[in-house]
Amino acid sequence: MHALVLSLFLAAATPAACVPDAHAPSLSWSEQIRVREEWLTQRHAMILEMMRRHGVSMWIVVNEEFHDDPVSQFIAPPRPLAGNRDIFFFIDAGNDGLKKIALTAYDEESVNRFFEPAEARTLKDLLPILTRRYQPKTIALSINSRRGVARSLTHDTYVALAQSFGRRNVKRFVSAEPLLEEYLDTRTDAERPIYTEMVQLTETLVKRALSNEVITPGKTTVGDVRRWLFDALWCNRVSTWFQPDIRVQRAGTGEEKTRDFLAVAKEDTVIERGDLLHIDFGVTFMGLNTDWQKMAYVLREGETAPPVGLLTALRNTNALQDALIAASRPGKFSGAVYDETMAAMQKAGIEAQIYSHPVGNQGHGLGATIDFRSKQRKDMPSGKPLRGGSYIAVELNTAMAIPEWHNQKIYVMEEDPAWLSDDGWKFFVPRQEAFYLVH
């Protein structure tokens, strides 16, 4: 009986014809931890300067068992933390530099390589010691933010910190968001080769998904493509941070939208000849994330290329990408980049929409967004300055009525991870300049 159960499990766990891509990660889990701990050493070296730049005297990250803080794996060794409540302190000790202290339930060798063990075993005993010794003027916590990654402190932990710090020090609590934003939006040179491979893998899997390897016109459903992508992630030893989405545009059908964007197609939608397909997909590996959107056309009988109108629409989206890159430079405010790019599109007579966002440790990261929705916020109309070397998902679309579809409006949506150089955004792999074709 046990042998039968095991065989069924192995059959379910291994997709048929699972052949990893050439860009699939080859590092074992232990090797991944080793590499990420090398990255962590580099990242810890940046923290003191960042804390001083943001006026932070003490920064506290708390990891709750079964409720991991989204920042934990980027400030502590990326290993499972299961100590009920593990607390990590970064303290500006003046001339003595950065003090890193960990109050954890278990004495763990890997943590001790990066942090000093706390000299008391409870918050109630430890915090008076730290406040007397270092007298922090500001204590940064993951509170008071629009974004989940920067508002992750639980109510019970906040209460425990407040009680242990005392009323006088609670007044010094500040949001860690500005510090977190710079920390998570700053990439190291050592990360780039791994991330480039991740983007290459993302591209390969999407090309395969939007091809006859997966799609048979008139038979394959949207759900079939999504399930293939999930299995491809498993086969390539990576995961994802959001469900793969497929959109289908079809001549003679109405336009259905959700939250300002074309609605995702239902799982039972059968892909037909003449359809314009769009996919939104991302890969997660070693604490990094990609975000990727591409377009495919399903050829009609007798066609060897998409209609001319579709080709023109794709060129319009490429022109929008060009304008965004031309307007972007380190230190420039994202609001100005948005305004200049949209002005260029207006001059060219192209209907455009931009919703680009930071990407890296989170798929939707903290940092400067170049996004039409950001322009609606009256508290920050100019946006934020772009950070050199940061990663962004250049996410946007153009819309155009094409004659081949009786002047029906179609959307060409693209999304490409890129890094910011002195000359603007640089794509990790070449952008899409031709539709993927399903025959």
Image: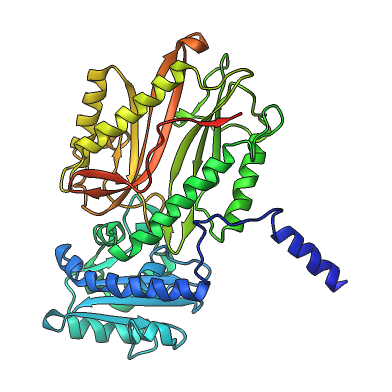
Q: Relative to 383, is 410 on the left or the right?
A: right
Pick the front one: 193 or 164: 193
The image shows residue 130 at horizontal and vertical percentages of 25, 83
User: Residue visible at 17% across and 48% down?
Assistant: 422
Reply above or below: 57 against 201.
below
Quadrant the N terminus occupies: bottom right
User: Residue visible at 64% across and 19% down?
Assistant: 301
The image shows residue 424 at horizontal and vertical percentages of 22, 43
The image shows residue 6 at horizontal and vertical percentages of 79, 69
Pick the front one: 284 or 140: 284
User: Residue visible at 43% across and 31% down?
Assistant: 413
Q: Relative to 330, is 214 on the left or the right?
A: right
Q: Relative to 10, is 307 on the left or the right?
A: left
Determine which quarter of the picture holds residue 396: top left
The image shows residue 101 at horizontal and vertical percentages of 31, 82
Reply above or below: 259 against 235.
above
